[in-house]
Image (tube, grey):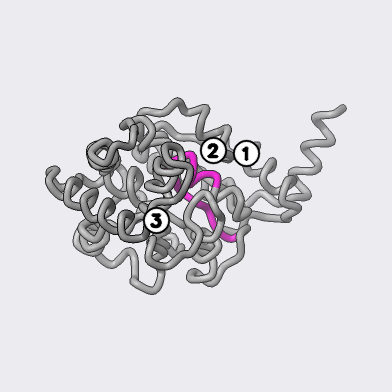
Amino acid sequence: MFEKSIENYLCSHSCERLHLRAVLFDMDGVLFDSMPYHADAWAEVMNRHGLHFTRQEAFLHEGRTGAATINIAYQRQYGQDASPELIQQMYQEKCEAFARHPEARPMPGTAELLQQVKAAGLIPVLVTGSGQRTLLDRLNHQYPGIFSPERMVTAFDVKHGKPDPEPYLMGLQKAGVQAHEAVVVENAPIGVQAGHAAGIFTIAVNTGPLDGQVLLDAGADLLFPSMQTLCGNWEDFRRATTIVLSTANDRAINDQR
């Protein structure tokens, strides 16, 4: 079922095998159903400061650092970056607006998937563009024993946020693995771009309002409609990763006959 996608990845990256050792998870929209609250908060604060910004645009920019998101809107309107002081002020207002919403629920299916990942001896790594302390502080409470602090990459750790590959390259480094030894689980186009640019097999889960084709166009190797669906198919996918490049090449030759 998943062999063709894996074959395509192996061929395009000149890898013999997808030797799975780590899984790199985004946070918002993957671990927590928090993106609707982020979208509301961004639209509220941006428009308060005279910057036209819709909830839909928030989903398109999901995964960027707060500073990068603010500067995109500011550059569009004023042709220059916002001052560091204004960025700090606006991001603080955004965090306050986010905090007024009810506590974001865990994404359905995620806890079960994380247990499968741990049971298989794989290393879970958090790779998020968020600096939202309320969510980061909840990780161990909601998913106890899953994400250790030394295996987290947040907005505080990187110079270049998603879609730059730096966050996922740092995630690989923290896990002690190479690109062909990991997979990314993402729900945002920008995050998918980052995982793809880092050379990692990238699984997209369409937990938001965007068309799934947007995620495929961003470079996703596989697309699932929800975390629950990914969870239900995880073991089949993991078994499919045992395919090797020679098998992929043999199938390609047979297809041409």
Q: Is residue 93 above or below residue 33?
A: below
In space, the residues marked 3 and 1 are separated at their CA atoms by 25 Å
Q: Can residue 233 be seen in this snapshot?
A: no
Q: Is residue 221 above or below residue 120?
A: above
Task: Name the foreground residue: 138 vs 89.
Answer: 89
Comes first in the chain, label 2 or label 3: 3
The label nearer to you, 2 versus 3, is 3
Residue 94 on image: x %, y % = 24, 48
Q: Which residue is drawn at 46% across and 65% down?
A: 158
Q: Residue tagged by mark 1? A: 5
Residue 54 on image: x %, y % = 33, 31
Comes first in the chain, label 3 or label 1: 1
Q: In which quarter of the image is the C terminus?
A: top right
Q: Residue tagged by mark 2? A: 222
Q: In which quarter of the image is residue 153?
A: bottom left
Residue 84 on image: x %, y % = 36, 60
User: Tag 3: Cα neighbours inside 10 Å, few (<14), some, or many (≥20)?
Assistant: many
Q: What residue type is labelled 3?
A: Thr
Comes first in the chain, label 2 or label 1: 1
Q: In which quarter of the image is the N terminus?
A: top right
Q: Is residue 42 left or right of residue 166?
A: left
Q: Which residue is drawn at 48% across and 42% down?
A: 79
Residue 151 located within the stretch drawn in magenta: no
In space, the residues marked 2 and 1 are separated at their CA atoms by 7 Å
